[in-house]
């Protein structure tokens, strides 16, 4: 959105966009890339399901949920930003505190929900590879749908807390977006505001950590499975035979590898996009002076 993550107090109530010059080229490119990427992901998932003539797996349901959630977030959050640029006015001037609070809620919701879905995808792959018996017995397609429902419900309840006084939303530079208040300067509820900011950022950091741990566990499990498979074949097999067996094993595990590669790519992209904000929230939200 061509927005700066610097919590400059001069932007909190500014009536116009700060530092605006020309067209919002960056915002337009990011919007088109997000919409195009999510639509492409949904198209590929549809083609994959049609080619294999099978019902969607748990992993595919979660991926679909992630793509739809991110697409909806992009389509809901981008129009107000474009309107601000078109009228060269800030979000608060455009719709007052009500619009700012609504926008801040949407940003926090569409930041938390996809992260939770990404974490669920990582846990699903970890269970499928590291604990196949438990996964086969207990994990069903209905579990994936219930997980998505719970994620949306939890994200909704958590991000609505500022409306109940636990936390606050505030406008940030350049004046086209609102998000969780990070410093609570001059606020009577400073402790509650900082507590929510710290809770949100800590939860995001914890989820990203879980994703990395689960992905690492899956990689280790796949390597161990391959090594055990080769050991069971015996050590007297010729080098050429071992190579053919190795290729055959990876062929059978191709779907697991595809899922892992996809999950790893999504994780890297998501972390690159979310860590600057998360890392900013943590130090700023820590109460000063004990």
Image (cartoon, grey):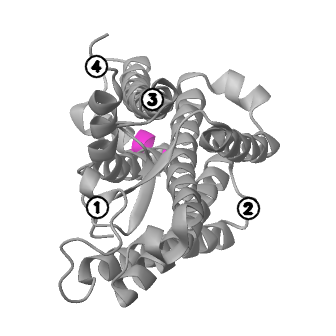
Residue located farthest toward the right when viewing the structure as drawn: 142
Q: Is residue 57 above or below residue 236?
A: below
Residue indicated by mark 2: 54
Tag 1–tag 2 contact (CB < 8 Å): no
Count of labels in the image: 4
Residue indicated by mark 3: 190
Label 1 and label 2: CA atoms lie apart by 48 Å
Magenta run includes residue 207 = no
Tag 4–tag 1 contact (CB < 8 Å): no
Look at the image and give the residue range highlighted in magenta.
248-252
Label 3 and label 1: CA atoms lie apart by 21 Å
Q: Name the front one of labels 3 and 1.
A: 3
Residue at screen point 58% across, 38% down: 120
Residue indicated by mark 1: 173
Q: Position of residue 219 (x, y in %)?
A: 37, 31
Image quadrant assignment for residue 71: bottom right
Label 4 and label 1: CA atoms lie apart by 23 Å
Classify residue 72 as left or right of residue 139: left
Q: Please tell me whether the stretch drawn in magenta is mainly helix, strand or loop.
A: helix
Label 3 and label 4: CA atoms lie apart by 11 Å
Q: Position of residue 195 (x, y in %)?
A: 48, 25
Q: Local crowd at mark 3 within 10 Å, few (<14), some, or many (≥20)? A: some
């Amino acid at each position: 959105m061509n927005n700066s993550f610097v919590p400059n107090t001069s932007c909190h109530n500014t009536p116009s966009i700060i530092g605006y010059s020309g067209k919002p080229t960056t915002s337009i490119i990011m919007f088109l890339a997000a919409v195009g990427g999510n639509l492409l992901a949904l198209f590929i998932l549809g083609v994959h399901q049609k080619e294999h003539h099978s019902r969607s797996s748990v992993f595919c349901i979660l991926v679909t949920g992630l793509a739809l959630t991110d697409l909806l977030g992009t389509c809901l959050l981008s129009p107000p930003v474009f309107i601000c640029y078109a009228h060269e006015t800030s979000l608060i001037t455009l719709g007052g505190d009500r619009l700012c609070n609504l926008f801040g809620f949407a940003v926090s919701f569409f930041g938390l929900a996809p992260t939770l879905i990404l974490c669920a995808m990582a846990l699903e792959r970890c269970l499928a590879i590291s604990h196949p018996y438990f996964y086969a017995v207990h994990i069903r397609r209905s579990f994936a749908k219930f997980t998505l429902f719970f994620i949306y419900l939890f994200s909704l309840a958590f991000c609505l807390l500022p409306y109940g006084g636990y936390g606050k939303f505030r406008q940030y530079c350049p004046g086209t977006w609102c998000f969780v208040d990070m410093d609570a300067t001059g606020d009577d509820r400073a402790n509650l505001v900082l507590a929510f900011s710290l809770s949100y950022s800590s939860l995001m950091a914890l989820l990203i950590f879980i994703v990395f741990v689960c992905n690492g566990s899956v990689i280790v499990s796949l390597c161990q499975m391959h090594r055990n498979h080769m050991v069971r074949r015996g050590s007297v097999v010729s080098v050429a035979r071992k190579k053919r067996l190795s290729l055959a094993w990876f062929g059978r595990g191709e779907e697991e590898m595809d899922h892992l590669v996809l999950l790893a790519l999504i994780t890297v992209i998501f972390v690159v996009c979310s860590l600057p904000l998360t890392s900013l929230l943590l130090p700023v939200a820590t109460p000063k002076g004990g």
